[in-house]
Image: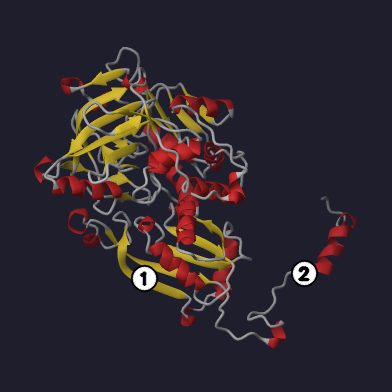
Amino acid sequence: MNANPEISNRLKPRSFGDLRGWIEALRQEGELHEIDAQVDWDGEIGAIARRVFGQGKGPALLFKNIKGYGPGDDVWSNQLFTGGLSNYSRIAMMLGLPKDAPVTDLVLATQHYFAQRVKPETVQTGPVKELIFKGDDINLYKLPVPRWHGLDGGRYINTYQGTVTIDPDTGQHNIGIYRGMIGQRDTLPVLLWRAQNWGVHFQKWADRGMKMPVAHVYGWEPCLPYCASAPIPTGVSEYEVMGAIRGAPVPLVKCETSDIMVPASAEIVIEGFIDPDPSTFEMEGPFGEYTGYFGGDQGPKHVTKVTCVTMRRNPIYRGTLEGTLPKRLNENSMTSSVQRAGVAWNVLKAAGVPGVTDVHCPAANNGTTLVIQLRQTYRGQAKQAAAAIWGSNAAHLRYKNIWVVDDDIDIHDYGSIDWAFAYRVNAAEDDIVFFPATFGSLLDPSTRLEYRDPIKFGTGKWCRVLIDATRNLDFEPQKQYGGDRFPPTVVPLPEHSDVVERRWKDYGFED
């Protein structure tokens, strides 16, 4: 696919090799904090992460002394890594940009990479095959999985993994992040929705009267969770996009109990099958979700029945703290603000919406709100942009609310957006548009509870909103405004600004 020349020449793709290579890179850049003090997996790890993640400026965390997972204990792992992508500087590192790159550059890089493909390569074996457990040797409780929040329904192992499934029609792999907790020693109850990619795969396997093979991958290069949590276009394997980000093919090895391919140097892989038979379901939920609320009430859910666990020696478990609140961000907050903006920009480009100059998703809402900046050349352009976004499969869990502003508005500054809302929006002029009864997130508590049944509906129910904060081109050009439709703003005239610039020090100010 075509490269984006605006950003491609500034990118320096980098392969970290595996999770350990990524951790070492963070250590060298001063982006890692290692905790040697003993911590409790039950609530304490989550509380530490919540405070460190803060407003998106804290370091990544490597926990090395977890209660019940020390020397002499019968465990598979005694280390936990989290927060690798919980700030923009580390996202920039992953994308091959300088650590101080502006957010727009991160979005442009994501837009570029998500349109590129580097096919993976197959290898015979790799470090993830160093230890193999089957049958009675399987015990997921040997992994230091936290109860991230005090009110979680269990120990959530699937928070920042890559869950791999295969389309039985095409053989195409899909990698996503879907929540799941430890049930029994060898079961993993999960939240599976029919509208998600693995839900589509699941239905195809069920229609064949078969269980769906699945593999959960924990700990590899940062591009794995970054791509797994993004709405990569249907029919495209995330492995091909990961290859573009790292600048090299992803080395894949075959699972032990299915044909699923997984990164050969991953830390841990849990293999299994999901049965459509409701009699196999186990209780799952609730969980502190990305919305900042506990979502998905406790109830019977689909289960990954584990058939095999492969891992490296002394593996590092990879997980993350979910749940976003004002001034309390996390990895999902930060990555969603970049990747969801990049995906939206590609959707707008593919739909032929012209004039888009910037796209932004504020970190606090994980991409539920989208802001589009465009150079308006004809009436209805903002509505065309919103229709393109809402009609794409990327809109399933995101883009509930869309703002569109002119190109003189800084979309990274809420005060600027609020000013445009105050003086360029008139509800009586169709500047606020509702798009009711669309698919949406089952985890959004603003949706009535009876509409959030995943078994009955397969998805949530949203009324989406467009706020068109662009200048209204239906207004007549005004002679007193120099032919413009709106009055001039109070920005100083250029000749006055030039005088002030020259004389700034004369006024006693520093540069």
Answer yes or no: is residue 78 visible.
Answer: no
Residue most extreme to the right? 506
Left/right of residue 287 with respect to residue 186 in the rendered view = right
- Mark 2 sits on what residue? 492
- Tell me if mark 1 has few (under 14), some (14-19) or many (20+) residues whose alpha carbon lies within 10 angstroms of its own: some
- Return the x and y of residue 378 as percentages of the image width and height: 55, 76
- Return the x and y of residue 29 as percentages of the image width and height: 59, 29
Task: Name the secondary structure under disc 2.
Answer: loop
Identify residue type, mark 1.
Answer: Phe
| Alpha carbons under labels 2 and 1: distance apart | 40 Å
Identify residue type, mark 2.
Answer: Pro
- Mark 1 sits on what residue? 435
Residue found at x 61% / y 65%:
407
Residue found at x 63% / y 81%:
485
Q: Nearer the viewer, residue 355 or 103?
A: 355
Q: What colouring does the structure picture have?
A: secondary structure
Q: Earlier in the sequence, mark 2 or mark 1?
A: 1
Residue found at x 43% / y 45%:
332
- Return the x and y of residue 72 as percentages of the image width and height: 31, 12
Name the image quarter holding residue 330: top left
- Tell me if mark 2 has few (under 14), some (14-19) or many (20+) residues whose alpha carbon lies within 10 angstroms of its own: few
Answer yes or no: is residue 346 visible.
Answer: yes
Which is in the foreground here, disc 2 or disc 1?
1
Residue most extreme to the left? 279
Give the number of the disc on residue 140. none
